[in-house]
Amino acid sequence: MSYDPPRPAGRLLLTPEDKEAPARTRRLRRLGLGERPEPTLDAFAYGLAELTGAAYAMVNFLREDGQFFAGLHAPAVAPVVRGDGTGALLGRALPRDHGFCPHVVARRKALALGDVSDYPRFAGNPVVDEFGVRSYLGAPLIDSTGMVLGTVSVSDIQPRAWGQAGLASIKEQAAGLVVRLERLERLENLEHLAHLEHGEIDGPSW
């Protein structure tokens, strides 16, 4: 596997190349996803956090220009406090070299990291120091066309023994969300056809 972009000397983490990014970005635009927060996906992320007891939960759509959390649950108080008393709060967007979702997308498989410090490839990721991430569990959102739209994932500020049960659970959540997204797409298409029959044109909506 090739990797892009090259990392600075001394950095062990490599961000996977994402050859599907242009096609994914077009697909997401057709679905009306990945450009704004979605209350239903925020609620989904909250449910993931409740299910797993994790500090962070995300529905992440990966575009050409980076990652966007259309669904997000995050701590209200920064878990990592700097020497000056300030801390970073996770927002809606991150570069591609932050976090572990790009690896899930490249692998097209779920990823469980019980303790990121055990993996030299991941231990140096910026989210570890910036947001206090110590563990990660994520699965790809693969639609019926075979396109990886993004991920559903949770991260915690302490090591977690996710195990096979955790992997099975996050994969089940991802599969269920894809069904919901594609159902909405079909409804949007039907509404669009109905508008065309009446001489109207409307855009996608949630």
Image (cartoon, grey):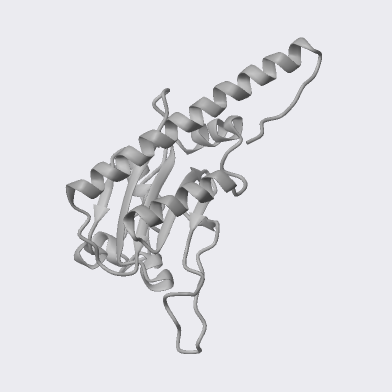
Q: How many numbered dots are placed on residues in this image?
A: 0
Is 187 rendered above or below residue 108?
A: above
Q: Quadrant of residue 185?
A: top right
Q: Position of residue 182 (x, y in %)?
A: 49, 27
Residue extending farthest to the bottom is 84
Viewer-proximal residue among 171 and 9: 171
Q: Is residue 97 visible?
A: no
Q: Quadrant of the C terminus?
A: top right
- Which residue does the image show at 45% across and 89% down from the upper left? 83
Please state the horizontal and vertical placement of residue 84, each as a whole percent of the image. 50, 89
Does residue 161 appear in this view? Answer: yes
In the image, 139: left or right of 161? right
Q: Is residue 60 above or below residue 125?
A: above
The residue drawn where x is 38% and y is 73% is: 129
Give the position of the N terminus as an image quadrant.
Answer: top left
63, 206: nearer the viewer: 206
Name the residue at 42% across, 75% down: 79
| Residue sitting at the far top | 197
Q: List x then y, in percent, for residue 178.
A: 43, 33
Residue in view at x 29 percent, y 69 percent: 158
Where's residue 56, x and y in %? 41, 60
Please indicate whether residue 88 sits to the left or right of residue 132 in the image: right
Q: Residue furthest right?
A: 199
